[in-house]
Image: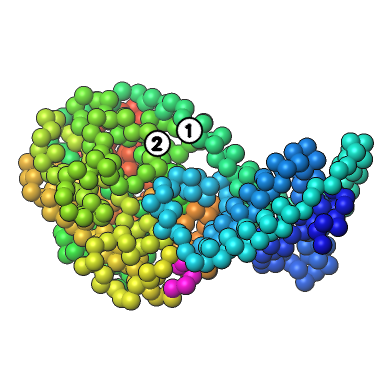
Amino acid sequence: MLKKINKLNFLALYISLVNLILYHFPFYKFVCENAELSSINGIVLLSSITILLIILNALVFYIGLFILRKVGKWILVLFFFINAIALYFINTYGVIIDKTMIGNILNTNFEESSSFLSIKMVIYLVFLGILPSVLLLKTPIPEVKFKKFMVTIGLTLLFVLSLAFANSSNWLWIDKNSKTLGALVMPWSYVVNTSRFYYHKSQKNEKQIPLPASKVANQEKSIFVLVIGESARSQNFSLYGYPKNTNPLLSKIENVKSYKAESCATYTTAGVKCILEYKNTGKLFEILPNYLFKNKDIDVIWRTTNWGEPTVRIKNFQDRKALKKLVNDDSYNYDEILLKGLKEQILASKKNKILVVLHTSTSHGPTYFKKYPPKFNKFLPVCTSVELANCTQNELINAYDNTILYTDYILATLIGDLKQLPEYNSTMLFLSDHGESLGEKNLYMHGLPVSIAPKEQLDIPFIVWVSKGTDQLKNNGILSQHHVFHSVLDFLDVESPIYDQNMSIYKAKK
Ligand SMILES: [Zn+2]
């Protein structure tokens, strides 16, 4: 049947229709949920968007096939495959394909990506990737004269413009929702957002803007351990009133205080940047470890099983591969590896002021059940599928709660280790890069733009332990991630022109 399409404009239109029907279910779901479809205006909006989508895509396909011929066809095949995968992710995890999500995908290593593979994904690939591709490859590309080609483009543009003007009353609605709509239009969501991601990445390689030199006020021995959590949300910590006992150890330790806090973003790179910077700007200032490492009186240690921080330039940087060498059992799979030999490392330091940063990965989805050793499988039954929507919400939350239980164990062990260093004045601060959705409003994981993100993705734990007692701590309202920088400077008695006492969680020293 396709062989009968003997005009290029019909073929382009046909491909555009197929593209609309196969890959835009989430797009229409969003429009139906967010536009007033019971009014005439709503119907006009819906039909205009549909016509625009079909015509504009057809126009691009038309130009592409005219210029690139066979290569254009293969690019469309590639689009079909990526569309299929994108649709799988959107339908399975409730994500949208914006710049942030592209960053998450491109930054995820294969080990993590493979945890997404599933039968359902194969079905998506076969029906939405392979089948339409085979049909397209079998279809010949009709010839068209250059003059006719230009006339077709001109007329189409004229039509699109008049339709857009006739619809000016709906521009506001489209503008308001442009971020989400753009992230659901195939294939442009990932084509445009991948380019945007790389553009921003090249910007990020810019130098960190240096901060004015700091000075240490005294030589009292002190340690600050900053633990950066991954996807931990405060509502599942019993310290924050969760009815299940996910903090059996921390709740029994003295001198622990938990603050309410909100993350500045819903994804790792932005959240970690906020934790490490002294204030929130569009720029990249020197981050905490680099800044303190420049001070000859301070030692900085960074241990990580995660990724996504701005470049850390210090001597003691240990990633998962380096940490793996410290053990010969399978404990390197879990975050307790971050504590291995840490006490000895601190004791070996010749400096009196030490900052330790532990960047964990424990509550990272979707395979929560893989992130803790079997003995922490306390809340049962747990979800063991990578397709979160296949599990009951209860199974999913159980698996997630076990990661919090494991985090509780790691933090309690860390505090125990610090207590064994009585010659130091020490403190531990645990906070998360962002929260996590566990099926509420049919959303999973994280990464929605802050403006539309639910509180589950933003409310983070901010838990502090102080060796000398919580009298040292202020009573604060809702904290931000930028409180970390100033609190660290304050606790280690670092003097700096950029230090802001209002942003410290510790009371002013007498
Ligand atoms: Zn994260």
Mark 1 surroundings within 10 Å by alpha-carbon count, few (fewer than 14), some (14 through 19), many (20 or more):
some
What amino acid is labelled 2 in the image? Pro
Please name the residue shown 24% across and 66% down the image. 374
Quarter occupied by residue 242: bottom left
Please name the residue shown 10% across and 35% down the image. 348
Q: Which residues are magenta?
A: 387-391
The residue beneath circle 1 is 204
Please name the residue shown 38% across and 51% down the image. 111
Which residue occupies the foreground of this view, 458 or 405? 405
Type of secondary structure dominating the magenta stretch = helix
Disc ID at residue 381: none
The scheme the figure's colours follow is: rainbow
Whether tag 2 and tag 1 are in contact, CB under 8 A, the answer is yes
Q: Is residue 225 visible?
A: no
From the image, which quarter does the C terminus lie in? top left
Q: Secondary structure at mark 2?
A: loop
Q: Position of residue 342 (x, y in %)?
A: 16, 44
Rounded to the nearest whole Å, what is the CA distance between mark 2 and mark 1?
8 Å
The residue beneath circle 2 is 310
Quarter occupied by residue 452: bottom right
Q: Is residue 390 magenta?
A: yes
Q: Position of residue 433 (x, y in %)?
A: 38, 50
